[in-house]
Image (cartoon, grey):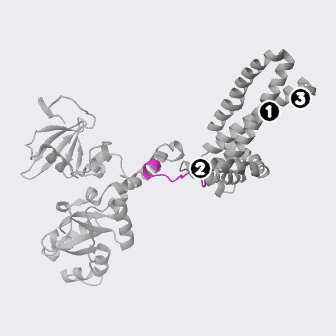
Amino acid sequence: MLDDIPLSTLFGVLILLIFISAFFSGSETGLLTINRYRLKHLKNKGLSGAVRASKLLERPDRLIGIILLGNNFVNILASAIATVIAIRLWGENGIMVATLLLTIVILLFAEVAPKTVAALHPEKLAFPASYILGPLLKVFYPIVWLINSVANGLLRLLGIKAEGGPNHILSRDELRTVVDEAGENIPQSHQKMLLNIFDLETASVEEIMIPRNEIIGINLEESIDEIVKQILSSQHTRLPVFHGDIDNTLGVLHLRHYLALQKQKEVSKEDIQQIMKEIYYIPEATPLNTQLLNFQKERRRIGLVVDEYGDIQGMVTIDDILEEIVGEFTTDPSDSHKEIHPQEDGSYLIDGSLSIRELNRLFNWELATDGPKTVNGMVIEYLETIPEAGTSLLIDSHPIEVIQTTSSSIKIVRIDPRLKKGGEKEHNDEKITIIRD
């Protein structure tokens, strides 16, 4: 039958078959590599190509079945036509030549080239292809069903289920990677906020709380004049109220309530106790994401952090947690942190009470946060003693010099974020011995 067809027609059919083979190859790669989340987004917008492609991908076994059925049929037919052409031109010896040439042509023009284009631009091939593959699947469904039934039966013997598409639920780390690679699609500030949200569950309130010795509050043992003076000069809108010390906290006073009452009469200590709100306690190990939801649920903005024995360790506010997401409002650490003082030589004097988490964020370091939570605690744990002023050490490749101490803690250290691991550093005409980690 093929012997009666002119060579020009056979060449034309062969070229057409190669194009059809390229279509099936490109369609397969385009549909299987398309971004599923973008596809879902386009589907929700009502894009017809995305709707059809999504429907095909609901059963990838059927999609692959119709593509391979068409591709194999086209390639086999092309091989038969190439063989007839070769015999006509070169006789029996032309079969080997035709096989070699056809393999190269199909490999280049029907496999590598279309699949490369589809991998680079999957939507441009997948969406148009869905208009053709959908009807083809309906027409040849009995054959595809038979092939898939046999193939799926073999897969079930291996413990593999073909029903349903792959699981595309992303883990937290995978989501971080997606945000990291978003590039110019997301502004850098927004990108950083999203990444900070992912980190909330890895940090606890203990890491960001205000230490108990730094809590500013109202001591009812003081005179009413001193209390009023403190209230009117306070930079905070909510102040804890206690007797003697923070361990005897009675509640939290909102300055708005105090000012409203002050307009009506002269406020006494008893009045303050009447208008203050009950204190809200927070376990120190509570993750930040959980506490943010707890603040919202309890309609609170401030709470005292307690340890497993119920002793007060510090205070945390909703603003502290939100700051973990949005970051600082200034680029200069010294502008927003009283614990940090820049020096002329480029180093920083750091208060020992500064949290390690904050130190990491400000200087882009990666000091461990699963142990001590402050610079003071980190240095003391590392040295296993309270050092003398002038002691220097190296923690995670970062030189730290102890500047001022007390009998019970480290008050000030010097850190130069420009320095990395080294042996000695000249400073103030003296050599500082660095304890290596």
Foreground of the two, 340 or 316 = 316
Q: Nearer the viewer, mark 3 or mark 2?
A: 3
Three-letter code, disc 2 = Arg
Magenta span of residues: 163-175
Residue 93, quarter of the rendered image: top right
Tag 1: Cα neighbours inside 10 Å, few (<14), some, or many (≥20)?
Answer: some
Calculate the distance from the C-alpha at mark 1 to the C-alpha at mark 3: 11 Å
Where does the N terminus fall, quadrant-wise?
A: top right
Q: Nearer the viewer, mark 1 or mark 2?
A: 1
* Of callouts 3 and 2, the N-terminal one: 3
Instruction: Find residue 370 and name its label.
Output: none
Tag 3: Cα neighbours inside 10 Å, few (<14), some, or many (≥20)?
Answer: few
> Mostly what secondary structure, the magenta segment?
loop
User: Secondary structure beneath disc 1?
Assistant: helix
Residue at 12% over, 75% down: 221
- Tell me: residue 410, above or below residue 268: above
Three-letter code, disc 3 = Leu
Residue behind mark 3: 2
Give the x, y percent position of residue 382. 16, 44
Foreground of the two, 129 or 143 = 143
- Tell me: residue 40, above or below residue 363: below
* Of callouts 1 and 3, the N-terminal one: 3
Residue behind mark 1: 77
Give the x, y percent position of residue 100. 72, 20
Residue at 71% over, 42% down: 67
Query: Dots 1 and 2: beta carbons under 8 Å?
Result: no
Give the x, y percent position of residue 238. 28, 70
Residue behind mark 2: 36
Residue at 77% over, 31% down: 18
Residue 197 visible from this viewpoint: yes
Three-letter code, disc 1 = Leu
Image side of residue 84 versus residue 42, left or right: right
